[in-house]
Image: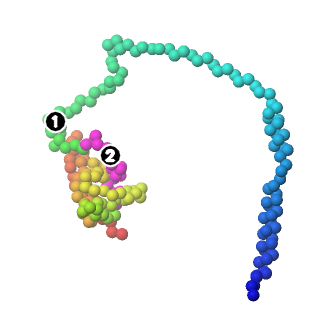
Amino acid sequence: MIRTNTTHQPLRLAITLLVSLLLAGCGVNDLSDLKSYASEVLARKGTRIAELPPVEPYEVYTYASSGGTDPFEPFFTEQKKSSEETAAVGNGLSPNFDRNKEELENFSLDSLRMLGTLELDEELWGIVRSPDGTIHRIQTGNYVGRNHGKIVAIYEDSIELNEIVEDGRGGWQERTAGLALIEQ
């Protein structure tokens, strides 16, 4: 014997009736208002498009450099210090300004956090989080911090780097800095 639940039958009937009424309302075939609007638009008289203004001829100008200054040369030339002057000011040490900066050089060293290390192909990589929350994988030779800090060694609990900072007398000096592993 098959039993049917009679308590849900009125609900099913009501839902079926409601859906049928909604679908019946969608089937209106009266398009007379749309047809009358389309015929009105098509019956409008077209207007003439205004003419384009005449194109003015290009006036050619020839630059004659009659012994004057070259406009493509800089006005001021910076006098480079000789190696003797640099040695007198400092020890000849200076950062390489011609290389492309790495992403972690945009942050101060104290805002970076060492999270751990990763060994990959028998090489130890440092895992560092920047202040914006991004996790970075770094290795020996990468640059970090705003003081031209180059990573010289990575250990299980710290990262050692050499920074090149101004010495206050117009020269540069090297100093040791580091990142230590943060215990969580």
**Which three-letter amino acid code belongs to the residue tagged 1?**
Ser
Expressed as whole percent of the image width and height from the top left, the position of residue 24 reads 82, 59
Q: Is residue 134 left or right of residue 152?
A: right
Picture quarter with the N terminus: bottom right
Q: Can residue 177 be seen here?
A: no
**Residue 106 highlighted magenta (yes or no):** yes
Q: Are marks 2 and 1 in contact (CB under 8 Å)?
A: no
Residue furthest to the bottom in view is 1
Q: Say the numbered circle drawn on residue 83.
A: 1
> In front: 143, or 18?
18
Q: Which residues are magenta?
A: 96-113
Q: Is residue 66 above or below residue 146?
A: above
Q: Nearer the viewer, mark 2 or mark 1?
A: 2
Q: Is residue 138 left or right of residue 53?
A: left
* Rendered residue at 25%/43% (across/down): 96
Q: Say the numbered circle drawn on residue 115.
A: none
The residues bearing labels 2 and 1 have C-alpha atoms spaced at a distance of 26 Å
Expressed as whole percent of the image width and height from the top left, the position of residue 159 reads 26, 60
Q: Determine which residue is flagged by label 2.
A: 101
Expressed as whole percent of the image width and height from the top left, the position of residue 8 reads 77, 78
Picture quarter with the C terminus: bottom left
Expressed as whole percent of the image width and height from the top left, the position of residue 64 reads 38, 13
Q: Is residue 154 above or below residue 38?
A: below
Q: Is residue 68 above or below residue 175?
A: above
**Residue 181 highlighted magenta (yes or no):** no
Q: Quarter of the image holding residue 10?
A: bottom right
Name the image colouring. rainbow
Alpha-carbon neighbours of circle 1 within 10 Å: few (<14), some, or many (≥20)?
A: few
Q: Is residue 23 above or below residue 52?
A: below
Number of marks drawn: 2
* Rendered residue at 83%/46% (across/down): 31
